[in-house]
Amino acid sequence: MSRLKTLVRNQNGIQPLRGGHSLCQGCGVPMVVRTVLSTIKQPTVVVNATGCLEVATTRFPTTAWNVPWLHVAFENAAAVASGVESAQRALRRRHALPAGEDVAVVVFAGDGGTYDIGLQALSGALERGHRFLFVCYDNEAYMNTGVQRSGATPFAASTTTSPAGRESWGKAQQRKDMTAIAVAHHIPYVAQAAATHWHDLSVKVERAVAANGPAFLNVLTDCPVGWGHEPRLFAQVIGGAVDCLFWPLYEVVEGRYQLTYAPPSVLQVADWLALQGRFAHLLEPENEPVVARIQEQIEGDWLALLDRCGDRLAPSLTRPSNSLPRAAPA
């Protein structure tokens, strides 16, 4: 059976996140949520940190959720998931839940609730070994509250708290490598995915839920308002992040890295930046050295990832060339 048919079958005729929510046109978050929850076969409890997803799907007195759902604060989503998972184990020991039916515990949090405000609770839950899946929908800023920079915001991006202008080219710091931070906790499964690559994401969700312990998925999605692109360009912008190697797709299983996607040709990072208003200032001639610095950083990170993966590639892949062949400039 094709994976798409499997997702439809798992829904049992009911979308886990139905229409009628108020997430923006061109926002990739609904696709992430539906792909994740439609991949999971067993009953699921969702823990949702404050953020775009929570605000836009639960405007009182309505809800877009068709699964058990808890809204919690920015900072404690992983702690609440730990409690739900621990309660499930306790009830099963008392024979208050069926012994053979696990309930999946899934957290959805944005980069603010993952990289920054929620990092302490997440680190603790990963270290303790609670069995749950934490999904970060990473749109690279505090979009819900006005496009403020976060720990996930890329270097040189313009936000309302790191504006580009005569005295600045945007955010001065590099973004955190949250995926590497999760790997450093020595948990069974960690992966990077993208909203546009739904098949790759679904496969990773399946493996994450089957892991014997905590699992972490860092999923890139966009914000047309904060990134400054037309909603219709959603797939082109997120796909461009993958194809220019800014956001490589890979997984780490029990500490072993494996690349799951290699672009057939590598997009120039300048062509990807040009699609987004948050980087418009970098297209000025005087900022060419900044773009070259970003390109160099991305290439270095990609080559380091290839070294970690070694010969461990997804079955459909051949090892990418270290020469980084370029696509013709757009």
Image: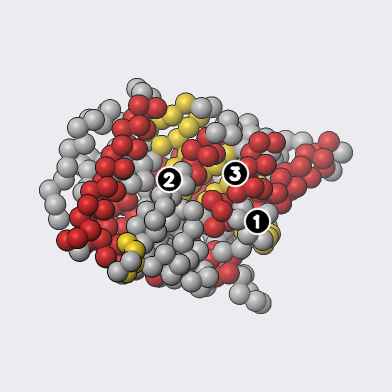
Image x and y of residue 6, in percent: 48, 45
Looking at the picture, does residue 72 appear above or below residue 300? below
Nearer to us of marks 3 and 1 is 1
Q: Tell me what residue is drawn at x 67 percent, y 42 percent.
A: 124
> Which of pointers 2 and 3 lies earlier in the amino acid sequence?
3
Of the numbered discs 3 and 1, the one sitting upstream in the chain is: 1
Number of marks in picture: 3
Residue 239 located left or right of residue 192: left
Which disc number belongs to residue 133?
A: 3
Q: Nearer the viewer, residue 204 or 220?
A: 220
Element marked by disc 1: loop
Residue found at x 29% / y 48%: 294
* Residue receiving disc 1: 75
Q: Where in the figure is residue 326, as x and y percent of width and height? A: 17, 42
- Mark 1 vs mark 2: in front: 1
Query: Which residue is farthest front?
Result: 167
Regarding residue 243, the answer to whether it shows in the image is no
Q: Which label was assigned to residue 97?
A: none
Q: Position of residue 226 (x, y in %)?
A: 40, 67
98 on left or right of 174: right
Amino acid at the residue labelled 3: Leu
Q: Amino acid at mark 1?
A: Glu
User: In the figure, 85 relative to 72: above or below?
Assistant: above
| Mark 3 nearby-residue class (10 Å; few <14, some 14–19, many ≥20) | many
Looking at the figure, which quarter contains the C terminus?
bottom left
Instruction: Evaluate whether residue 181 shows in this view.
Output: yes
Which quarter of the figure has residue 316?
top left
Q: Which residue is mark 2?
A: 193
Q: Are marks 2 and 3 in contact (CB under 8 Å)?
A: no
- Judging depth in this view, the residue of 18 and 74 nearest the camera is 74
